[in-house]
Image (cartoon, grey):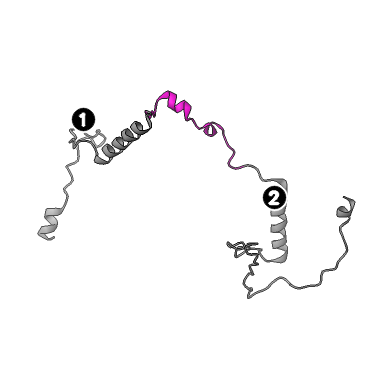
């Protein structure tokens, strides 16, 4: 071991008789005066109070009552039960994926308009392994009867 290492090596104090003995308390702490940043802040508050002729009051029961955030008094349900339609849609999606042997994952955003307000259509990159038949014939059976009944 080098002599420099021996000099800078911190030496731990010898273990106390009782390792569970509390640490020394009420030891002296040097006082270096007020923090300059805090003095500047208090000075700025005093200047502002003089300018608007109003005393800033914080932390009193009156100020806490005046500025109380009522929303914090409400117990919110951050994990509400999902709507029945959402549960059904998730079930139908997972069963369709299982039946077709593929997953329907959107790999990019599909915005209707760009950030400039222009109507654009985002095209997804072509898949190397297409598992779903595309561009197939879809018969036209006319307008849905439920739509016509309305």
**At x 38% / y 32%, what residue is drawn?**
52
Q: Percent from the top left, x then y, of residue 141?
A: 88, 64
Q: Main secondary structure of the magenta part?
A: loop
Local packing at callout 2 (Cα closer than 10 Å; few below 14, some 14-19, many 20+) is: few
Residue 133: x %, y % from top left: 74, 72
Question: Which quadrant would residue 63 be assigned to in this image?
Answer: top left
Checking the image for residue 86, the label placed there is 2
Q: Is residue 91 left or right of residue 54?
A: right
Residue 44, above or below 86: above
Quarter holding the N terminus? bottom left
Q: Any magenta on residue 70? A: yes
**Mark-to-mark CA distance, 2 and 1:** 62 Å
What secondary structure is found at the residue carrying circle 1? loop
The residue at the point 69 percent across, 66 percent down is 101
Tell me if label 2 and label 1 are in contact, CB under 8 Å: no
Is residue 139 left or right of 71 when viewed as pictured? right
Residue 91 against residue 114 in the figure, above or below = above
Q: Position of residue 87 (x, y in %)?
A: 70, 49
> Which image quarter: residue 91?
bottom right
The stretch drawn in magenta includes residue 132: no
* 85, 60: nearer the viewer: 60
Q: Tell me the element at label 2.
A: helix
Residue position marked by numbered label 1 in the rendering:
26
Taking 68 as reference, is 93 left or right?
right
Question: In the displayed image of the protein, which residue is found farthest to the top?
Answer: 62
Residue for point 70% across, 62% down: 98
Residue bounds of the magenta highlight: 55-79
Query: Could you say where residue 36 lies in the image, as x and y percent from the top left?
Result: 24, 40
> Which of these two is toward me, 93 or 121?
121
Q: Residue furthest bottom?
A: 128
Q: Are there few (<14), some (14-19), or many (20+) residues within 10 Å of tag 1?
A: few
């Amino acid at each position: 071991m080098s002599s420099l290492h021996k000099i800078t090596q911190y030496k731990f104090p010898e273990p106390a008789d009782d390792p569970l003995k509390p640490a020394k308390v009420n030891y002296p702490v040097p006082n270096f005066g007020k923090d300059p940043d805090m003095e500047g802040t208090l000075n700025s508050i005093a200047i502002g109070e003089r300018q608007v002729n109003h005393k800033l009051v914080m932390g009193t029961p009156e100020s806490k009552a005046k500025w109380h955030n009522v929303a914090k008094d409400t117990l919110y349900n951050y994990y509400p039960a999902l709507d029945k339609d959402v549960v059904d849609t998730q079930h139908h999606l997972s069963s369709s994926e299982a039946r077709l042997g593929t997953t329907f994952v959107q790999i990019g955003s599909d915005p209707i308009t760009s950030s400039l307000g222009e109507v654009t259509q985002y095209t997804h990159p072509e898949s190397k392994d297409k598992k779903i038949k595309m561009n197939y014939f879809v018969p036209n059976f006319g307008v849905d009867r439920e739509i016509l009944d309305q």
